[in-house]
Amino acid sequence: VQNNFVETAQKGIKLSGYVDTGYSYNFTGQGGNSQVNSRVQSDSAQQGDFNLYAVKIALEKAMTSENKAQAGFRVDVMIGEDAKFLANPGATHAFDGTSQNNTQMDSNFLFLEQAYVQLRAPVGNGWDFKIGKFASIIGYEVMERPANMNITYGMLYNQVPFWYTGVLSSYKFDDYLDGKLGVANGSNSDNNTTTSGGSDGVVLLAALNVTAPGGNANWSHNFQYSTASENSTGAPGAAGTAQGQNALPVNVASTADAGGAYTIIYNSWGNWAPKFADDKLLLAFDTLLGNAAGANGFNSATAGTANNSTWWGAAAYAKYQFNDWFSLAGRGEYFGGDNLAKISNGLGTANQNAGLSWWEYTITAGFNVIDNVLIRAEYRLDWGNNISGTSVGAMQVH
């Protein structure tokens, strides 16, 4: 009998993972009103909270560097509080119609982060393909907290898709230039046959990365275009609205009332490790510009109609490794928008025509005192208009 599964003991198959846990304290208070709107929900703890952010397991058969026809695969599974929000960031709860917030922590939640087959066609320098579910190409930060400079996710990371289901191709032109092209069902969406009227769009992806001679600096340009209302996993709340949807970076109307609804995101990020610092200093930046035509103004006088929403932001990072066991990292960010429809809490409703303006600064100390153990301590300050309070009926920015 032929086995149709992969044995993990075979050469080239690697199993890895980590456990990420900690304690967080939120000075804004407790309950739903302690929600910090500029943060990913699992970073907005209710006053004091022990957190199991993630148990991460990855199984991979990586392709070799040889330019020949070959195949591989990767599967990433995450369990924990991060998993719940990364899996379905724009989900609406049936019991109260509100989006997820920091009162719904769940360390038992299971999230299939990535699962794709990887293929290489021996064309030119080698043309690679990922087919399945894969992480977003947009943004400097990633879903795995230990891989980021800081413990908490940045504001800009909370404004972009986390993952896609589709096909992503990549090609390395030379040692200095590589690019990506892809097509997917939608942002944070597995679904291509939906219950939502008119919501059968797609996401088109493109990226171009420049690497400096010497390999100590990168500059990446990333682009996303989403047609119609992509692929929602829920029905719209009312005619011309998409309050029940979770796919878009910003929800758009799912019926003909929206007209030619679309979303465009442009992201540019870069990093630099100056050679004069002997690999101890790392500098980075991240910028974001997005526009959604046909976005719903739930908190405006024209709630339920198709409007336009634009958002933008920038972040700067710095990390210095003082010695083998101690490092210090800082992050400063700004995020703005032309309306408050992304949060739609009580204060936002009373001031719906105001622009959105948020700032945050984070400082993180890292301690590598034991092999395979990273201990970090962090302080973060967020400020701006309508920065806290439970988001009700908000347009999801994921």
Image (cartoon, rainbow, N blue to C red):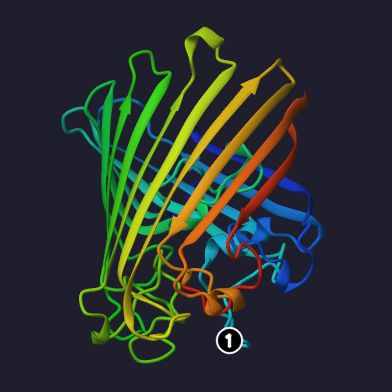
Is 374 or 298 nearer to us in this picture?
A: 298
- The type of residue carrying mark 1 is Ala
Residue 83 shown left or right of residue 32 in the figure: left
Residue 225 shown left or right of residue 282 in the figure: left
**Residue displayed at 26% across by 86% down:** 257
Is 131 or 137 nearer to us in this picture?
A: 137
Determine whether the residue tagged by mark 1 lies in a helix, strand or loop. loop
**Residue displayed at 41% across by 69% down:** 247
Is 176 or 242 nearer to us in this picture?
A: 242
**Residue displayed at 39% across by 18% down:** 215
**Residue displayed at 66% across by 70% down:** 389
Residue 278 shown left or right of residue 29 in the figure: left
Relative to 359, residue 202 above or below: below
Residue at the outermost bottom position: 239
Residue at the outermost left position: 124
Is 36 or 221 nearer to us in this picture?
A: 36
Say if residue 8 shows up in the picture. no
Q: Position of residue 349 (x, y in %)?
A: 53, 79
Q: Quadrant of the N terminus?
A: bottom left
Q: Position of residue 66 (x, y in %)?
A: 30, 25
